[in-house]
Image (cartoon, rainbow, N blue to C red):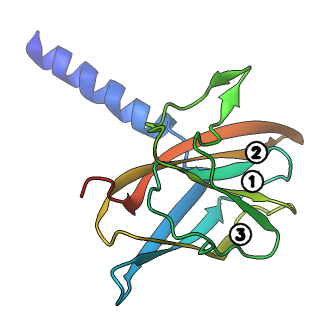
């Protein structure tokens, strides 16, 4: 009986792994520690084939990014930067599609495209400098547009990324 249950659970978990789609957008960062005790986070955003980032609806948010040095954000051409207290989070019919931890006293950083970013593209040139050189594991979310059979649909992604430590 236990052998059959174990085999069933193993098969079910294998099917669940196969059923999970690849991330629509991958966000990666490299942290550079500066001589003055600050740190600069350099980001890149990569779309998967079949995904686009569309102006007016899609975005990338990194949550709980406290201690940002005023005016330090760098943004590549075709993107707009903001740092809201509450991050943009993907929604579906008005409800959150992902549930990130968003701490109210820590601003978030958000980039939205001002031109369409096609599938399979990697965009670099995003950066922000913060007052802390300590890092912690944080979260990001993104909303992208997927085209299947010529029908666009919004997709939500949540992932983990290094962020500034807010515990000193």
C-alpha distance separating marks 3 and 2 = 14 Å
Q: Residue furthest top?
A: 1
Identify the residue at image location x=73%, y=76%.
76
Structural crowding at the residue carrying mark 3, measured as other residues with C-alpha within 10 Å and reported as few (<14), some (14–19) or many (≥20):
some
SS for dot 3? loop
Structural crowding at the residue carrying mark 2, measured as other residues with C-alpha within 10 Å and reported as few (<14), some (14–19) or many (≥20):
many
Q: Is residue 152 left or right of residue 38?
A: right
Q: Nearer the viewer, residue 61 or 27?
A: 61
C-alpha distance separating marks 1 and 2 = 6 Å
Q: Is residue 139 left or right of residue 47?
A: left
Q: Is residue 144 left or right of residue 46?
A: right
Identify the residue at image location x=35%, y=25%.
12
Q: Can you identify the residue that label 2 sits on?
A: 146
Asked whether disc 1 touches disc 2, contact meaning CB atoms under 8 Å apart, the reply is: yes
Identify the residue at image location x=27%, y=20%.
8
Q: Can you identify the residue that label 1 sits on?
A: 50
Structural crowding at the residue carrying mark 1, measured as other residues with C-alpha within 10 Å and reported as few (<14), some (14–19) or many (≥20):
some
Instruction: Point out the image quarter for the C terminus.
Output: bottom left
Q: Can you identify the residue that label 3 sits on?
A: 121
Of discs 1 and 3, which sits in the foreground? Answer: 3
Q: Determine which quarter of the picture holds residue 75.
A: bottom right
Q: Determine which quarter of the picture holds residue 70.
A: bottom right
**Tally of numbered discs:** 3
Residue 124 in the image, given as x and y percentages of width and height: 64, 77
Residue 163 in the image, given as x and y percentages of width and height: 40, 60
C-alpha distance separating marks 1 and 3 = 11 Å
Identify the residue at image location x=26%, y=29%.
10
Residue 69 in the image, given as x and y percentages of width and height: 52, 70
Residue 159 in the image, given as x and y percentages of width and height: 47, 48
Asked whether disc 1 touches disc 3, contact meaning CB atoms under 8 Å apart, the reply is: no
In the image, residue 63 above or below residue 163: above
């Amino acid at each position: 009986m236990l052998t059959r249950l174990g085999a069933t659970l193993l098969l079910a978990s294998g099917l669940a792994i196969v059923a999970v789609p690849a991330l629509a957008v991958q966000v990666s960062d490299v942290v550079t520690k500066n001589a003055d005790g600050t740190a600069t986070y350099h980001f890149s955003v990569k779309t998967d084939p079949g995904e686009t980032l569309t102006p007016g609806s899609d975005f990338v948010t990194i949550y709980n990014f406290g201690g940002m040095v005023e005016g330090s954000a760098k943004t590549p051409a075709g993107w707009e930067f903001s740092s809201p207290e509450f991050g943009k989070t993907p929604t579906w019919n008005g409800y959150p599609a992902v549930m990130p931890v968003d701490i109210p006293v820590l601003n978030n950083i958000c980039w939205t495209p001002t031109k369409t970013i096609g599938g399979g593209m990697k965009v670099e040139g995003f950066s922000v400098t913060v007052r802390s050189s300590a890092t912690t594991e944080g979260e990001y979310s993104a909303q992208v547009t997927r085209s299947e059979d010529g029908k666009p649909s919004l997709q939500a992604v949540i992932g983990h990324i290094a962020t500034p430590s807010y515990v000193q």
